[in-house]
Amino acid sequence: MRNFENVKWKDFYLSEFFCCEKGNQNNMASLTAGDIPLVSAKKCDNGYKDFIAPNRKKTFRGNIITLNNDGDGGAGIAYYQPYTMALDSHVTALIPLSPLSRHVLLFVAMCITKQRNRFGHGYSLNNNRLRSFKLMLPLNEETTAPDWQFMEDYMKQKEQQILKPTIEKLCKRLIIKNILMGGGKSLCSNWKAFYFTEVFTEIQRGKRLKKADHTEGDIPYVSSTSLNNGIDGFIGNDDGGIRRFENCLTLANSGSVGSAFYHRYTFVASDHVTKLKRDGLDKYAYLFLIPIINRLSEKYSFNREINDERIKREKLLLPATDKGEIDFAFMSAFMKDVEHNILNTTLKVFKERLNVNKCKIWGGVNWKNFLLRDLFPKLVAGKSKGLNHIEKLDDGISYLGATNQNNGVLCFVNRDKNTIQKGNCIAFIRNGEGSMGYSVYKVEDFIATSDMTLGYNKHLNRYTGTFITTIADRVRGKYNFGYKRSATRLSKEIITLPVDNNGSPDWAYMENYMRNIESEQILKYLQSIDCKEYA
């Protein structure tokens, strides 16, 4: 996925893509209450001013943009409107001249709003200014039109980033609710508050290890992050200056305060987390405890950390036996039941997908030879002159070279805008002992050496891309140092692919075939988990 740094932009007139129509609701006193949103020149609430009943004036369909013509602090703000609405006279409807998706319209609204500082009560958006209104949009260099696909992908990515923590929080609440309500099958009517010191036999904080003292290695280093199961990196330190734990929970004392995770493996703990352990407890009981412990995040924050004294005073509401003791057996049985249900549901989904895909791909398939240059209308060489001309960075962009390992990635380097090349392509390796003749599919943007040639086709995705690379790799035996894979020879290579009734590459078949392979592998993994253990 490209970002703003490596995208070219261009000015476009608003009128090239939108029909501008001014709102018509100008007699507010005559309006009555109803369920149609009335959009006005507000700077909040997506422009909603009220909800009104239908009247004789026009309503506007959804999936458009509204633009505030004037207003105190609201002038120049654009909103995406998904529903049918009424507009007052201070708002203009921007109606797409051709169909545009919700994500594209959200992106365009964002670009328009970036210019809001130009407008106000003394300088409103009238008809003349709308006709001459320009906005900068990402450019599709191949067509010189706006790059609608980039806008779509970018906003989908942003949407996922925004929704992910919310979905995770809702899922945790759902688990807590299931636990507190008994989870349907597993019922527990007796709950009791227990101190942390009653629940855990070992409560110990990790040990401070400065970033500068980290050595390279493969031991998980757990700190106060709420991501990646609390793992902040991997280290190789193996001396008395560290604390190693395993088969326990960690609780973040600072940073993402209250975040708890289960670790069945050996790890090194920083001084920002506390180990919580009880001898004889299995992973299911630990997993049961996590969402309940996480609720401490509502009480503590960056300015009020969970220190050693406070944790001893905290209590957890847990299932209890008739004798008033912690019912660890119930916790373990409950989480086994949850895991069993999730696995059964997942297995069912993948079995259904596998059956559908098999129906699609079984049967006779016609194949045809294609010249590589015909299959890839755009063949370009890598731009990098070598690693001596660029700085290596652990968190940089992928650097592709003459290797058939790590999906062609030699290392990660600094982002040089002049040499970055777009992803969603196939990289053909033209040099290198043992690697010449191989190809890899790349979804992400990257920097490549001149030993690579990159093939682009609009039908490529990760499924069709991996299908083609599997077939393209069959030519690798014909090349060696005495007979190199030059750009000319590459363009004349022949690839045999499935074809449709028109004799064109059957992209749908290739995608379904690879999806089927993927589903089979996932299904094998799921079936390798012994579901009987959870019954």
Image: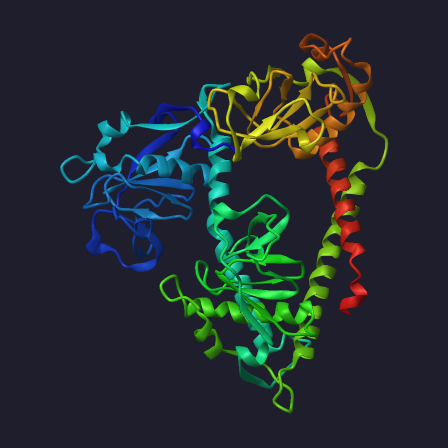
Location of residue 386 in the rendering, given as x and y in whole percent from the top left corner: 57, 19
Query: At 28% across and 28% down in the image, what residue appears?
Result: 133
Query: At 49% across and 60% down in the image, what residue appears?
Result: 271
Location of residue 177 in the rendering, given as x and y in whole percent from the top left corner: 55, 72
Location of residue 292 in the rendering, given as x and y in whole percent from the top left corner: 54, 71
Instruction: Between residue 239 and residue 140, name the one nearer to us.
Output: 239
- Whether residue 525 appears in this view of the structure is yes
Query: At 52% across and 19% down in the image, what residue appears?
Result: 389
Decide if residue 22 is on the left or right side of residue 447: left
Decide if residue 183 is on the left or right side of residue 148: right
Q: Residue furthest left?
A: 122
- Which of the 4 image quarters holds residue 533? bottom right
Query: At 80% across and 55% down in the image, what residue appears?
Result: 528
- Which of the 4 image quarters holds residue 67? top left
Instruction: Between residue 183 and residue 305, name the one nearer to us.
Output: 305
- Whether residue 317 appears in this view of the structure is no
Decide if residue 186 is on the left or right side of residue 70: right
Q: Residue furthest front?
A: 240
Q: Residue furthest bottom?
A: 323
Instruction: Between residue 349 and residue 427, name the one nearer to us.
Output: 427
Which quadrant, please, contains the C terminus?
Answer: bottom right
Decide if residue 444 is on the left or right side of residue 512: left
